[in-house]
Image (cartoon, rainbow, N blue to C red):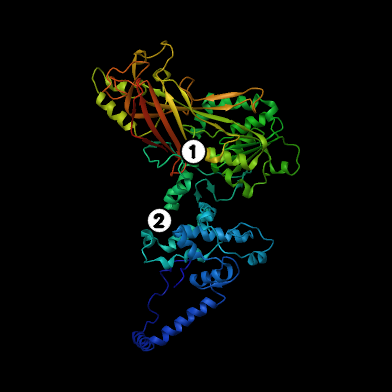
Amino acid sequence: MATISNHPQSEEEPKNHEFDDEEEEEENEDEELEGWDDWEAEDEAAEGDEEEGSDSSLLCLFCDSRYGSCDTLFDHCISSHHFDFRGVRTKLGLDFYGGFKLINYVRSQVAERRCWICGVTCESSQGLQNHKHETFSIEDIKPLWDDDRYLKPFMEDDSLLYTFGEDEEGEGEDDYNASIDKDELMRDLKKYEEICIDDENTGDMIVYNADNSDKNGRKGVASASNGHLDVAGSSKKASKDKHLRGSFPTLLSKDIKNVNENYFGAYSSYGIHREMISDKLRTDAYRQAILKNPSLLNNAVVMDVGCGTGILSLFAAQAGASRVIAVEASEKMAAVATQIAMDNGLWQSKSQNEGNKHSTGVIEVVQGMVEELDKSSKIQPHSVDVLLSEWMGYCLLYESMLSSVLFARDQWLKPGGAILPDTATIFVAGFGKGGTSFPFWENVYGFNMSCIGKELVGDAAKIPIVDIVDNHDIVTNSTVLQTFDLATMNHDDVDFTASAELEPYSGGSTGMSNDMECQTRSCYGVVLWFETGFTSRFCKEMPVVLSTSPYTPKTHWSQTILTFLEPIAMASGKPSGDRLAAIGTEACPATKIQLRVSIARAVEHRSIDISLETAGIGSDGRKCKWPVQIFNLH
């Protein structure tokens, strides 16, 4: 079995001929044919010598032995190290990428002198060599290496990664194996340090100095389309595995790298930052929480996760923080935040860190994802007094940045330290015809074009809409769908399933639409919004609430609209006029609408899946259920 070369063959290299003279060529061919058996035997012997030779390229996973073939290496691992790579792959059904991750995982553990099975750390490499035992409960330890970070080669020029799967070619295990160009695969894998997978940024962290140059980012736009959610809160591991099926070069260049590039590239657009800073409710809420609570911020160490232009870090410095660590993944915006801090005399220079007391700057900008800070930063674990972030997206959870904030909390925040904001709540209410496009199309210069409105409402039943909903178009009570406590919640709590019950709006008639003043009104769907709280738990002098409700001035988050498959007629306390009629119709309006909503991080990175189950309850207790609706916000 030949090993794959690290470089494709040059076009200038000789191919199947070595002699220009035709007679010599023919004579040579005759000699080769005559001595075929001898040549074959010599070649096999040479291959055997290569396996034993010192120039063999395949390094053992556990010791310094090298081999010329994967089979010989894996046989050695079984006999000397009690590691049966082929057996583990077979038992767990690992595909090429699963085997790739397993090799990198084992190498990473051996480098740390840890047992790959039980995790015990030995005092020396020899101690690890002597620490041998059989593999147990292999299914239980699979999650240890089933992580996308192990798709990054642990060891540079690790030939084993590019040869262990060659014996599968032609066996038909996976359709994609035959279509992958091995040289291209190897080049892509070796470039993996430049690729971002999920929330992992495998590049080096850059602490910005005054002379750092920036790059031009690309603007991205959040949009929405219908998707699919198998189960509420479904395992992200399963999503990742599904996402890894296919051509690996395509996966790296399109499905993974572009997600984070587009996301952080979007935040390289000054227009987005202007929109956020110009959102008075948003910016003033943070400004008041920071500046009006001096006992919290004065002389504190603050970390700002996703600092953008650095506006919140500037507020923290203004409030008297002794150190502000501004973390920003966009290279361009990290450079901009550094320049802004310098221009305002708040940047902390290297000379200042080394003892120069003349500067009063406290802000240091670190470029990279917060998940990578522990690999290059000098920040001590659990040394931050206040964790600050404006992480909220559409429908609160779009962008999946909450996971990064929770990671920073667990890694850097002191026990009992403050997190701003510290609570977040999602609300839900039903909206009427005015929340749809129906009113516009019913009268277009005196012509009825409601057929267009009906089609648009039908399409909206598959797509979440981010838009402003007028509070006059709310036709039910509003209720809490889900509450998060950022100081105590677990990472898995980001995905949730919750139930809610809506009843016809019971407020006064002042300012209400004609549709709402009717005894029977139609609910066309539900609207979601959120509030974040800077509560008295940490903001003792002045608690603050930031709301994106339809009943408060609009924000750049707007609201998120989920349209029903069909409108549901509702009436408060009206007895069923027709017991044979379906619940939710004009003939038999519902008195309540029961909802079951699931929101989970989607397969597509930074998107969210929303499932909506709806049931109408009649005054006589009868129930009508509608099919589950699936929405994807991306």
- The image shows a total of numbered marks equal to 2
The residue sitting at 56% across, 36% down in the picture is 308
Cα distance between the residues tagged 1 and 2: 29 Å
Quarter holding the N terminus? bottom left
Could you say which is closer to the camera, residue 48 or residue 218? 48
Residue 216 placement (x, y as % from top left):
50, 43
| Residue 154 appearing in the image | no
Task: Say which residue label 2 marks.
Answer: 247
Q: Is 81 left or right of 596, judged from the image as shown? A: right
Quarter holding the C terminus? top left
Three-letter code, disc 2: Ser
Three-letter code, disc 1: Asp
Considering only order in the chain, which callout, 2 or 1, is on the residue closer to the N terminus? 2
Task: Say which residue label 1 marks.
Answer: 495
Extreme-left residue of the structure: 447
Residue 509 placement (x, y as % from top left):
41, 11
**What kind of element bears circle 1?**
loop
Q: Is residue 331 above or below residue 123?
A: above
**What kind of element bears circle 2?**
loop
The residue sitting at 39% across, 86% down in the picture is 37
